[in-house]
Amino acid sequence: MDSDTPPTEWVRAILPLAVLSVVAEAETYGYAVAQRLRAAGLGTVKGGTLYPVLNRLEGDGLVTSSWREGVGGPGRKFFTVTDRGRAHLNDRSGSWHAFTAQAASLLPHPTSTHPTSTDSRSTR
């Protein structure tokens, strides 16, 4: 695994919210979403993973889609965030940041010289 790419399970956890966030930036299509996720450091998200997420977001009423003819190529399905999706994104983003801050408070900092296990003196 590339040291700059987060573990798959972390990406899987944040993917629906990250995809919704990308769609909320501007109307877009699947390949562009994948490129934006990659540029953000989430690694390569393949279509077999991305499109089911987009379909779930649409099924939940968080995004809408429409087909457009391609210029010199096949048509593309464009996605747009809904008002409900924007509200969901704002709510869940706050929850995600609170959660990750709580989790981070439990973990040693990578530059810390402190042992990762509990010091036996602190449990007496």
Image (spheres, rainbow, N blue to C red):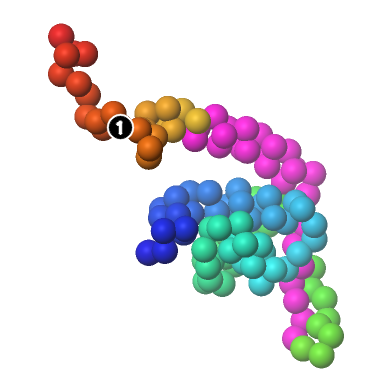
Query: Residue 4 lies in magenta, yes or no?
Result: no
Quarter holding residue 66: bottom right
Query: Residue 84 lies in magenta, yes or no?
Result: yes
Q: Is residue 51 visible?
A: yes
Q: Nearer the viewer, residue 4 or 62?
A: 4
Q: Estimate the x, y position of residue 117 in percent, counting from the top left.
A: 22, 29
Q: Estimate the x, y position of residue 113 in percent, counting from the top left.
A: 30, 32
Q: Nearer the viewer, residue 68 or 107?
A: 107
Is residue 54 left or right of 110 when viewed as pictured? Answer: right
Q: Is residue 65 visible?
A: no
Q: Nearer the viewer, residue 72 or 120?
A: 120
Q: Secondary structure at mark 1?
A: loop
In the rendered image of this protein, does residue 105 appear above or below residue 23? above
At label 1, counting other C-alpha atoms closer than 10 Å, the crowd grade (few under 14, some 14-19, many 20 or more) is few
* Magenta-drawn stretch, dominant element (helix, strand or loop): helix
User: Residue at point 37% right, 29% down?
Assistant: 106
In the rendered image of this protein, does residue 36 appear above or below residue 123? below
Quarter holding residue 28: bottom right
Amino acid at dot 1? Thr
Report the quarter where the N terminus lies: bottom left
Q: Estimate the x, y position of residue 24 in percent, counting from the top left.
A: 75, 51
In the rendered image of this protein, does residue 31 appear above or below residue 122? below
Is residue 55 left or right of 120 when viewed as pictured? Answer: right
User: Residue at point 54% right, 29% down?
Assistant: 98
Report the quarter where the C terminus lies: top left
Is residue 34 left or right of 101 when viewed as pictured? Answer: right
Stretch of the chain drawn in magenta: 74-100
Quarter holding residue 52: bottom right
In the rendered image of this protein, does residue 9 appear above or below residue 105? below
Q: Estimate the x, y position of residue 68 in percent, counting from the top left.
A: 82, 76
Is residue 45 left or right of 71 when viewed as pictured? Answer: left
Residue bearing the label numbered 1: 113
